[in-house]
Image (spheres, rainbow, N blue to C red):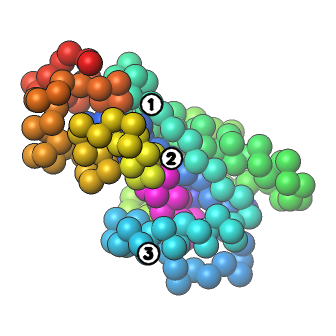
Amino acid sequence: MVCGIDEAGRGPLAGPVTAAAVVLPRGFPFHVLADSKVLSAAKREAAATVIRENAVAWSVAWAWPREIDEINIHHATLLAMARCHNRLLMRVRMSGVPNAVTRVLVDGKFVPAVESPCEAIVRGDSLIPEISAASILAKTARDRWMTEYAAHDPRYGFEKHKGYPTSAHREAVRQHGLCIIHRVTFCRGLENTPT
C-alpha cells in the first residue's frame, strides 16, 4: 500500500502546522483530487469528505506553535508528518487490513523519520493522488481548527486569514500583541509580548 503525506500551514504567523497521511483504494474516485491550493474551500471540503469516507486509512497530526518556536518550522513539519504516519500505521494495524504500508510518498524535498520506506517528490501534491488527498485533508483540518479558535479569540480574524501574514493580521498583532497560538519566532518585529 502506498501512503501519501503532505502538510499545510508552514507560512502562517499563528497556529499549528498540520500534516495528513492517506492510503487510497484502487477504486477511489480520483477525479475529486487536486492540489488543495487550487481547489475552492467548498470543493476542498467536499473532497475531504469523500477521502475520509473512502480511504483505506487516513490520519491527521499537528506540530504546535511552541514546538515550531523550539525546533523551527522545518523540523516541526517533519515531526507532524511522522506523527500522522505513525497514527495511520496504528489505524491500518487495528483495522485488520492484511497489507502493510510498503511505501511512503511525501510532498517536497525532505522526508520524516519513519519506519516505512520514504521518498520525497517535489510538487507531489499535483502528481500523486495519495499526496493530493493528504494535501486536502491537512488543509481542511487546519482551516477548521483556525476557524474554531477564532470563535474563542476573535481579536485577530483567524477565520478569515487562517493565521497567514495578511495586512489585517499584522495590524491585529500590532494592536493586541501576540496570543498563545502565535509563533513568536515568526512575529519578531511585530510584537514579542504574549498576552
Q: At numbered mark 1, what does the secondary structure look like: helix, strand or loop? A: loop
Query: Mark 1 or 2, which is nearer the eye?
Result: 1
Residue 146 lies in quadrant: top left
Which residue is under mark 2? 19
Q: Which of the labelled discs sits on residue 64, or is there none?
A: 1
Label 2 neighbour load within 10 Å: few <14, some 14-19, many 20+ = many
Q: Rounded to the nearest whole Å, what is the CA distance between mark 1 and mark 2?
A: 11 Å
Precedes in sequence: disc 1 or disc 3: 3
Precedes in sequence: disc 1 or disc 2: 2
Q: At numbered mark 3, what does the secondary structure look like: helix, strand or loop? A: helix
Precedes in sequence: disc 3 or disc 2: 2
Query: Mark 3 or 2, which is nearer the eye?
Result: 3
Residue type at numbered disc 1: Trp
Image: magenta residue range = 128-142
Residue type at numbered disc 2: Ala
Task: Say above or below: 151 vs 179.
Answer: below
The front one of 122 and 150 is 150
